Image (cartoon, grey):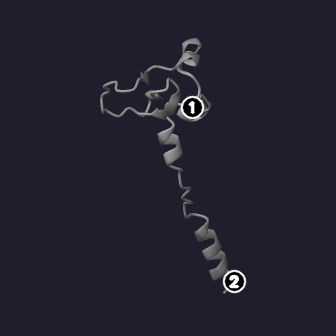
Amino acid sequence: MTRWIAFLVLLSACVPVVVPVPLPGPDLVEDACGAAGMQDLIGQRQSVLAAMTFPAPTRIIQPGMAVTMDYSAARLNIWIGKDGRIERVTCG
């Protein structure tokens, strides 16, 4: 019996251990452009953008402005409201 247990213990050491690799979650994919770090811009006047530099590609979207509907996770979108204040900062 002892030999049998020893054999099973040695045999179990040969079984590979599978370690799951974490997949990028929705937070990583949704914030590929860094929009999460720029949410403090919301509510500020559009003029604050003049003193800032943004990663390429970035779009500053004015009210009524035509924009393409293609999605690019790396593109930063800054949406300006009719009052001249920043409404949203998103990726896409």
Q: Which residue ends up furthest to the front in the rendered image?
A: 83
Secondary structure beneath dot 2 equals helix
Point 56% across, 22% down: residue: 45
Point 45% across, 34% down: residue: 91
Task: List x then y, in percent, for residue 8.
Answer: 61, 76
Q: CA distance from mark 1 to mark 2?
A: 70 Å
Q: Quadrant of the N terminus?
A: bottom right
Q: Is residue 71 above or below residue 23?
A: above
Foreground mark, 1 or 2, reads 1
Q: Which residue ends up furthest to the right in the rendered image?
A: 2
In this rendered view, identify the residue nearer to me: 8 or 25. 25
Task: List x then y, in percent, for residue 18.
Answer: 54, 58
In this rendered view, identify the residue nearer to me: 36 or 23. 36
One can see residue 88 in this view: yes
Task: List x then y, in percent, for residue 70.
Answer: 31, 32
One can see residue 24 in this view: no
In this rendered view, identify the residue nearer to me: 53 or 73. 53
Q: In this figure, which residue is indicated by the disc labeled 2?
A: 2
The residue carrying pointer 1 sits among few (fewer than 14), some (14 to 19) or many (20 or more) residues within 10 Å by Cα, namely some
Q: Which residue ends up furthest to the bottom in the rendered image?
A: 1
Task: Name the kind of residue labelled 2 in the image.
Answer: Thr
Task: Name the kind of residue labelled 1 in the image.
Answer: Ile
Query: Image quadrant of residue 75?
Result: top left
Residue 52 shown left or right of residue 76 in the figure = right
**Discs 1, 2 touching: Cβ within 8 Å:** no
Point 50% across, 20% down: residue: 55
In this rendered view, identify the residue nearer to me: 85 or 7. 85
Number of marks: 2
Q: Is residue 89 above or below residue 2?
A: above
Q: In this figure, which residue is indicated by the disc labeled 1?
A: 42
